[in-house]
Amino acid sequence: MSKNNRQPFVAGNWKMNGSLALVADFNEKLNTVNTRAQVVICAPSVLLHAFKSTAFSIGAQNVSHLDNGAHTGELSVSMLKEAGCEFAIVGHSERREDQGESNSLVAQKAAKCIAGNLTPIICVGESLEVREAGQVEAFVGQQLDALIDVLSIDELKQSVIAYEPIWAIGTGKTASPEQAQEVHEFIRGYFAKVDAELAQGLRIVYGGSVKPENAETLFAQNDVDGGLIGGASLKAEDFISICHAAN
Ligand code: 13P
């Protein structure tokens, strides 16, 4: 399967930003988006109810690995489904760092999503320290091993992988198209050792300072199937132009 057979994927991650007014703006403006990409907005959970658009899907930024019970502040897969989510980001580096989420917890969250019919957008990626030590493949490989240990081939086929180098997130320092392609190719090759068909069909998107100005060259790389967009997903016009770049 060539790149052209994988539907491009562009998701916005609003993080702890946004408001009902911004949702209203997106409901109106994103209807003009004209892209062959699948488009998703991952907004704060309390805003999800206000999205009303057929032009894009909505997703959560995190989900519990548990079904229900005494877990104050957590949200389950079934709650997010009822709120209209079709996707959930799992293992974002900000949560791995701030909440100490481990590789195995991230894999459990992804498994819970798939069991409940929510597509996980699973984030991996290295720090600057790891990159400078020449350990990118060893580090990302460990993150992938945890997924391969817990998820079946069929479950992996239902996932989206986001490569987000931590040093490129919110820093304005985008990975060069070559740097992104190098790691995306490594990730696809890693899954190819498990199952060739899985690797060929898997959507691997890039995140880290994607902007309207750099999206097209990043998305044109052979193994880059779209993006996970932070800051630039907070302005409808910028986000739309990034969605168009995925054509
Ligand atoms: P920025 O696009 O703001 O660098 O954020 C990327 C990101 O973390 C998306 O999940």
Image: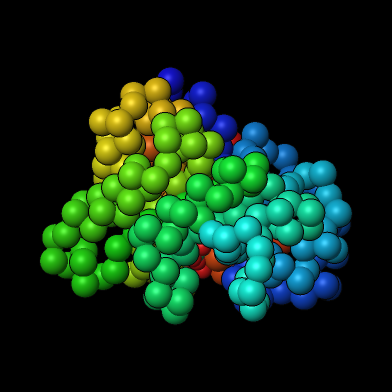
Residue 85: x and y in percent read 72, 52
Instruction: Tell me the residue at 64%/45% (across/down).
Output: 116
In the displayed structure, does residue 81 sit left or right of residue 73? right
Q: For this rendering, which residue is in front, 204 or 234?
A: 204
Up the image or down, 80 lies above or below 74; here it is above
Up the image or down, 35 lies above or below 113; here it is above
Residue 223: x and y in percent read 38, 37
Instruction: Tell me the residue at 32%/35% (across/down).
Output: 191
Farthest residue toward the front? Answer: 69
Farthest residue toward the left? Answer: 133
In the displayed structure, does residue 220 sit left or right of residue 66? left
Instruction: Tell me the residue at 21%/51% (across/down).
Output: 137
Residue 172: x and y in percent read 43, 71
Q: For this rendering, which residue is in front, 219 or 23?
A: 23
- For the N terminus, the image quarter is top left
Residue 193: x and y in percent read 26, 31
User: Does residue 129 appear anywhere in the picture?
Assistant: yes
In the displayed structure, does residue 110 sit left or right of residue 48? left
Up the image or down, 152 lies above or below 112; here it is above
In the displayed structure, does residue 225 sit left or right of residue 37? left
Instruction: Tell me the residue at 73%/59% (across/down).
Output: 79
Q: Which quadrant of the view contains residue 235? A: bottom right
Q: Which quadrant of the view contains residue 173? A: bottom left
Q: For this rendering, which residue is in front, 37 or 125?
A: 125
